[in-house]
Amino acid sequence: MDLIKPEAWSPPAGVQLDSITMEAVRSSASAVIVAGPGAGKTELLAQRAAFLLMTGGCPAPRRILAISFKRDAARNLHQRVVLRAGEDFGRRLESYTFDAFAKSLIDRFGSTLPAWCRPARSYEIAFPGWRDWDEFAGRLRRQGINQNGSEIEKRHATLTIQPGPLPADESSELLVNASGVAWWQESLNSTPPRLTFGMIATLAMTLLAHNPLVRAALRQTYSHVFLDEFQDTTTLQYELFKNAFLGSDAVITAVGDSKQTIMTFAGAKAGIFSDFARDFAATPIALSTNFRSNVRIVEIVNSMARVIEPDAVLVNSARRAALPPKPLDQVLNYRDAAHEADDLAAMIASEVRAGDRTPEDFMLLVRQSAPQVEAQLAPRFAAHGLTLRNEARSMGSIQIQELMTEPLADLVANVVQMGAGDREGAPFHRVRTVIGAVFGEADGRPASEARVERAIRDAVAVVRNETGSAPSPEAVPTMVAAIVAAFGEAPLAQLSPDYARPKRFAEIQAGTVAFLQESAVGASDWAVAVRRFRGADQVRLMTIHKSKGLEADTVIFLHLQDSGFNRNANMKEEALIFFVAASRARERFFVTSTSTERRRVQPLWEMMTAAGIGDSSANARA
């Protein structure tokens, strides 16, 4: 891999970077970058990785560690780096979520933890619900420890006064959270042990605190660290990060938007940008160009930002083209949900038939109850020849949107696509990128490269007989099992930290089978089935929370009314979430309502008014 001189490096054709972004890409110092939606935050990190790797700013064999809040964001960043810098350089960027990063430390070095808090290697990830916490609180009350379930949930991972490492001794006076200690004892002594991701973060801190050699090795491995979606970082996650890198020589780049903090319910840390700038002597940088949206959408986003944060940094649209005469923003009022379903389906179908837009250009967002909304809309959409894809719908134990981020599901889809003779999107290279690391291709030896290519050929061969005939849902379980067998379950288990648990691997495989079966029903060929699996030619429906990091030509927020929100909703938090919804739009932003009950959500309607989006409630559309 030949390096180029820093002054000779430039972004690839088609990538726009303004002068401030280019300066951040080339910087040799730590920085905290605050940027609005559409400012190209992920692209900035991808270009920075390409610059550092291709110019030797990150000298081999050292690596770049990238940590994102969500798995799809982590995968997206890695894919962009491979596209910008090539596969060889791309292998030296390791992209994790915070949870996956913490888990990787425990899985590799957990045997060095203090004995009293050391989980067995067979531990499972736990996702307790409110009933679990209430039941546990009830057991404690019978022992004389009074605390409610929600309080235990909030503090269960932190046993000391502040979030931090656990002491070496279980009897230490530093352990002040009695209910939390009881939860840990019960969790660690269960068969198998059950750990929440919060507990794993605390264990990772503990591991680094008690094992300076491990921490030193971590710091020696990574010369640069990227933090994406930084605004959603929790206090616990930030403390883990400080334990890992504070005082090291790593150059840290944190990127986020303070107005897009939608993880407050999960403990997103207030004031994290200023804390980071102080702790890591990082230079604050504000990006003020929006590359995503047209001028009108940027006006809406700026107006909402001013309501949320009066001194917010406003952004400019990079696009100067004249706006079309058709409405770019509008309130669509309906008498009831049935009329709403009919009108939205007719509107979208009309635009698709006219060739103005594709189904994928539309994103329908709800605050909650996506399955209920799907039940109302899907039949009318189908009557107009449209498929509504509820990203929140579950395939077994996993939601469709989460399934699409799973490397196993992506691997299966690409192999089936190749078996069907479809080369669109370079599936061979995607499979090679996914499995190359676990098959040892990173060592550069011809034997390893040959092993990867042979495994791909074998996997494609085992499905070619099936993909040569019309899709049959009944064939899918055998086909997927054959793909897994061709690569080997043991190597595939290394694709994700979660796959170390056979139960989780089986769940992902089952979800992949179920959704591919559904996608195969009525498909003309297997290439079409794979396109359906991935969401081609489908209108997306999802919660705002799941829309983070995504965008669409036309965003339609459904049910801006009291019944569309939780009864106990905090309107300050909801304003941030509503801001996220509007900022997903590239060209148009519409809002619907089927009720005049709007007392609780009145602050959001005031944001609409401030943005100049009129409410024609007196003139319902249907």
Image (cartoon, rainbow, N blue to C red):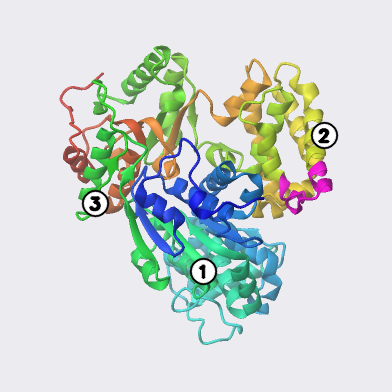
Quarter in which the C terminus is drawn: top left
Kindly identify the residue that appears in the image at 38 percent across and 57 percent down: 33
Amino acid type, mark 1? Leu
- Asked if the residue under mark 2 is in contact with the one under mark 3, i.e. CB atoms within 8 Å, the reply is no
Residue 10 in percent (x, y) is at 48, 46
Is 321 in the magenta?
no
Disc 1/disc 3 C-alpha distance (Å): 30 Å
Residue in front for this viewpoint, 275 or 161? 275
Is tag 3's residue or tag 2's residue first in the polypeptide sequence? 3
Residue 609 in percent (x, y) is at 17, 38
What residue did someone put label 1 on?
A: 240
Amino acid type, mark 3? Ile
Element type at mark 2: helix
Label 3 environment density (alpha carbons within 10 Å; few <14, some 14–19, many ≥20): some
Of marks 1 and 2, the one in the foreground? 2
Q: Which stretch is magenta?
A: 436-451
Amino acid type, mark 2? Asp
Residue 125 to residue 383: above or below? below
What residue did someone put label 2 on?
A: 458
Is tag 1's residue or tag 3's residue first in the polypeptide sequence? 1
**66 displayed left or right of 367:** right
Element type at mark 3: helix
